[in-house]
Image (cartoon, rainbow, N blue to C red):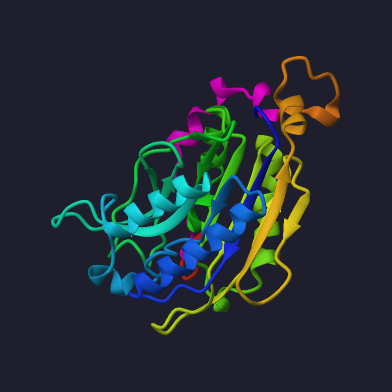
Amino acid sequence: MQKDCIIGLVQMISTVGDTNRNLSRILVTAEEAAGRGASLLCFPESALHGYSPQDAPSLGDSLDSPAIRRLRECASDLQITLLVGMVERVCKNVKPYLAQVIVFPDREPQVYRKVHLGRSEQEYFSAGNDFPVFFSGGMRFAVGICWDWHFPEMAAIYSLKGAELLLAPHASPLVAGNRKEIWLRYLGARAYDNSVYLAACNLIGPNGSGKEFSGGALVLGPKGDILAESGNCGEEIVFANLSAERINTLRSASRASMKESFFLADRRKDLYRELLELNPVVFDVEDKSQNE
């Protein structure tokens, strides 16, 4: 990292199909975050259009739509990088993507498309096929959307590509359980094992289409420690100041202490061929032969 960076993570209500309302809320939130010194602000999965796979055929925008143009104006005016979850449409004959558009203050937007779709999403969305790393404000960062972060290989790829911050926008419903408790079971390991900052945020409240989301925002340090977290059950921005010195020390070739370990530097990639070739062993609970 070239310098310290203040980031913001948003937990917000997003109403399915009410893009104008959602966009207005995003713009107001961006203005507040910029006023508090944030140079990067991340919104939850599908924040622009609301999250509802079964409604996907009637949702979405392209990257040159009026809504995205308005986000570009906002990012330029406020000199802030915005990461906004959306349903992205590319053409009529292709299912849309669950995407995170990265809106820079000084250049064309870029996009991350969700690679690992949940089972309830596969009927309605196309899966992305790339792991891009972005750069803004002196920092390299990358995005994975919700279900993506259950696949540890993804975080390793991003760290090996030089990402210093991983963003994890979510649309996790209330029925799934306490979001912070669940995140801490695995996101801390993603940060720790890969020596990266990791920041997550979630939708909150009803979506107007039968689902309710649990909220949550969390920022973890590169040793899995909690730097900041949400503190209420309403819409909120959580801020964290990311230290350049801390992660640069971990990534330095001259690091000398176990306390400063960058584990990926010592990996044995020559032995990991099986990771690509093996399929999981799945047992049929009714198959008695497994116990014989």
Q: In the figure, 255 relative to 99: above or below? A: above
Q: Nearer the viewer, residue 93 or 258?
A: 93
Q: Residue at x 49, y 57 (%)?
A: 147
- Quadrant for residue 76, please give it: top left
Identified at 33% across, 51% down, the residue is 127
Q: Position of residue 242 (x, y in %)?
A: 71, 41
Residue lying at the far left of the rendered structure: 93
In the depicted structure, whether residue 238 falls above or below residue 21? above
70 part of magenta stretch: no
View extreme (front): residue: 77
Coordinates of residue 88 in the picture (x, y in percent): 30, 56
The stretch in magenta equals: 263-284
> Left or right: where does residue 165 sit relative to residue 230?
left
- The answer to whether any part of residue 280 appears in the image is no
Vertical relation: 6 (above or below) 33 = above
The tally of labels here is: 0
Seen in the picture, residue 64 relative to 287 is either above or below; the reply is above
- Rendered-image quadrant of the N terminus: top right
Q: Residue at x 77, y 14 (%)?
A: 254
Residue furthest out toward the top:
254
Left or right: residue 203 versus residue 250 is: left
Would you identify the image quadrant in which residue 250 lies? top right
> Which of the image's four quarters has the C terminus?
bottom right
Residue 130 location, quadrant: top left
Q: Relative to the observer, which residue lies in front, 15 or 162?
A: 15
Residue 24 x/y as whole percent? 43, 68
Q: Nearer the viewer, residue 265 or 169?
A: 169
Image coordinates for residue 124, horizontal then vertical, percent? 28, 64
Question: Does the rendering let one see residue 102?
Answer: yes
